[in-house]
Amino acid sequence: MFEDLVRHHQQGLLAGERSFAIALGLANPASHVERAEREVLDRILPHIATLVGPAARLIDCGPFTGLRTAQTLATLERPKAIVLMNREIDPRVFDTLQAKDTTAEISVAPASANPANWDLPAIGSGTTLAIISGGGLGFLTAEERKELFHGASLTLTSDDFLLVTIELAQDAAMVEAAYQEFGQSLVRTCLTRLGKSHGFEARVFHQAASQQVQFGAVAQKDASIQWQDAGCGFKLGDWLAMGAAQQFTTETLAHEVAGFEVHQTWRANDGRIEVMLLKKK
């Protein structure tokens, strides 16, 4: 539960922890990624629906579960099932899908499911299409991506598909500018959820060596975070790391996805994101 994540990091603060899960402040995809992805999906989803065929199972996973479910569902022919992997999904997404005239059985993942082991029952005999939308893959750590791909590899069978949106490596100044508003909001949300904060300045910067945009807050004089009957003070210059957005190349991501082959790729008109269709070997 999300409350457990907040309590975990509050206890971590008391123990000296200064690095936090990006999920603490992550609510929506970056606007430039969301717009570019929508443009690509409008072009390619009819083609993907033809590849997948009728009676498919749709699995929506990753940080932005539900973002593209309805859009994808609208193109599939008589889908058999929809599984939303994030159990804490906004209930309005579930309600919207249930209100649609669809043949699909709509459900959330079982309580036993986790990124490395999806633990989903087999439904129907059609192809499965799993999606990770909104550039959500880039907000996961390398270890979290490894777990998610492992779960996909265990769940999907030969000739099933995994559709992934990635943000491409690009000019540092350009990507830094694109993430300023998003990053400032993410940092403020992280601090608000941790407690009543004072004396922090949000920072968003590109790290060339890792091809990441880093998010965090630097302590000014007399900085503090207080919650209930507890709290922490910070020294001038203390850094609170709040996650990163990873940029990829097609080759680097393909190297991470063991058990899949790149079936087809499509690039946004602005050249900033790529949608990859991976096929289970």
Image: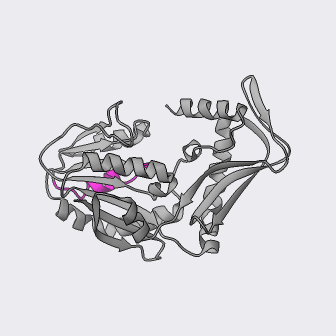
Q: Is residue 65 visible?
A: no
Magenta-colored span: 62-77
Q: Is residue 243 visible?
A: yes
Q: In the image, residue 143 lies at what x, y percent?
A: 47, 49
Along the viewing direction, whichever of 24 and 214 lies nearer the viewer: 214
Total labels: the figure holds: 0
Along the viewing direction, whichever of 205 and 47 lies nearer the viewer: 205
Residue 191's quadrant in the figure? top right
Quadrant (top left/top right/bottom left/bottom right) for the C terminus: bottom left
Query: Would you say 79 lies left or right of 242 here?
Result: left
Query: Would you say 18 lies left or right of 126 here?
Result: right
Along the viewing direction, whichever of 111 and 29 lies nearer the viewer: 111
Residue 41's quadrant in the figure? bottom left
Q: Is residue 125 above or below residue 278?
A: above
Q: Is residue 273 above or below residue 241?
A: below
Query: Would you say 30 lies left or right of 190 here?
Result: left
Residue at the spot 44% in from the left edge and 40% down from the top edge? 90
Residue at the spot 18% in from the left edge and 40% down from the top edge? 122
Q: In the image, residue 3 lies at what x, y percent?
A: 55, 30
Residue at the spot 33% in from the left edge and 51% down from the top edge? 69
Residue 215's quadrant in the figure? bottom right
Please name the predominant secondary structure of the magenta segment in the image. loop
